Image: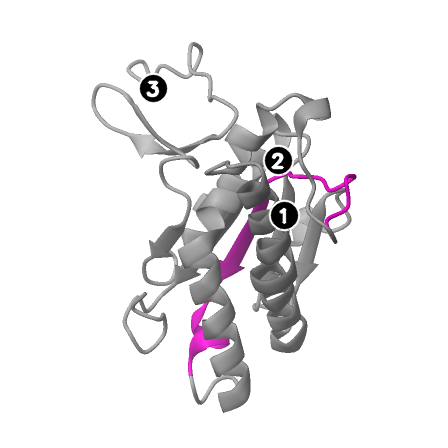
Amino acid sequence: EDNFPIKSFNLEDRNFMVGKSRSSIIQGDLADIPHLLVAGQTGMGKSTFLRQFITSLYLKNKDYTFELIDLKQGLEFQIFHNLPRVNVKADVSTSIMVLERLSTKIIEERSELLLANDCKDIDSFLAIEQEERKYPKGVDKRIKLNRHIIVIDEAFDLFMKGIAKVEEVAKSRQAASKIAAQGRAVGIHLIIATQRPDRYAVDPQ
């Protein structure tokens, strides 16, 4: 504990703590690491890591919204139930609906907005003065470009054939793959935890 610089340690807004080495805190930045795969066997700390990850980003960023998919009947994320800006889903069907909405409507709307303003990501768009921003037809000027954090605890139950229905697996994998491919620029981040990090449980993409 004497070597742990907790008193002087401060996370930047988009940063999250991974752990510590002998000499320093190890942390990540959502701008550099937009998506995460958290893997490990039962009891090795996946859910503990996810809870501190969510908590630190939630407290430091008042405009972030969180979609928490907890297929352990909501037990792992119960401390986040009923919090503002946090939605917790505990079944496959509603979880797929969340992924599909973010991978289609939200990504497409935000991408149109960035394209109309010649921006590569939401940070460059937000740097434009309000009166100089361009809004393409169909995009509401009141659109809120906050970051969305999607956390899936035990993705095996959502992406694995034989656990979920075949058509549900196809939908969830397709939506997650699109978010992984296009989410970074538009501020949608995918955090997947699983005991089984292989191509059967998680799409190789």
Task: Locate residue 149 relative to residue 178 in the image: left or right.
Answer: right
In reply to whether residue 145 is colored magenta, the answer given is yes
- Please state the horizontal and vertical placement of residue 190, each as a whole percent of the image: 47, 53
Q: Can you identify the residue that label 3 sits on?
A: 1
3D distance between C-alphas at marks 1 and 2: 8 Å
Tags 1 and 2 touching, CB below 8 Å:
yes
The three-letter amino acid code for the residue at tag 1 is: Phe
Q: Can you identify the residue that label 2 sits on?
A: 58
Q: Helix, strand or loop at disc 3?
A: loop
Tags 3 and 2 touching, CB below 8 Å:
no
* Badge 3: residue crowd in 10 Å (few <14, some 14–19, many ≥20): few
Among numbered discs 3 and 2, the one appearing first in the sequence? 3
Q: Can you identify the residue that label 1 sits on?
A: 66
Which mark lies nearer to you, 3 or 2?
A: 2
Q: Residue furthest top?
A: 8
Q: Quadrant of the C terminus?
A: bottom left
At 73% from the left and 24% from the top, the residue drawn is 131
Q: Helix, strand or loop at disc 2?
A: helix
The three-letter amino acid code for the residue at tag 2 is: Tyr
The three-letter amino acid code for the residue at tag 3 is: Glu
Residue range corresponding to the magenta coloring: 139-160
At 65% from the left and 64% from the top, the residue drawn is 101
At 71% from the left and 39% from the top, the residue drawn is 144
Residues 184 and 110: in front is 110
Q: Is residue 166 above or below residue 55?
A: below
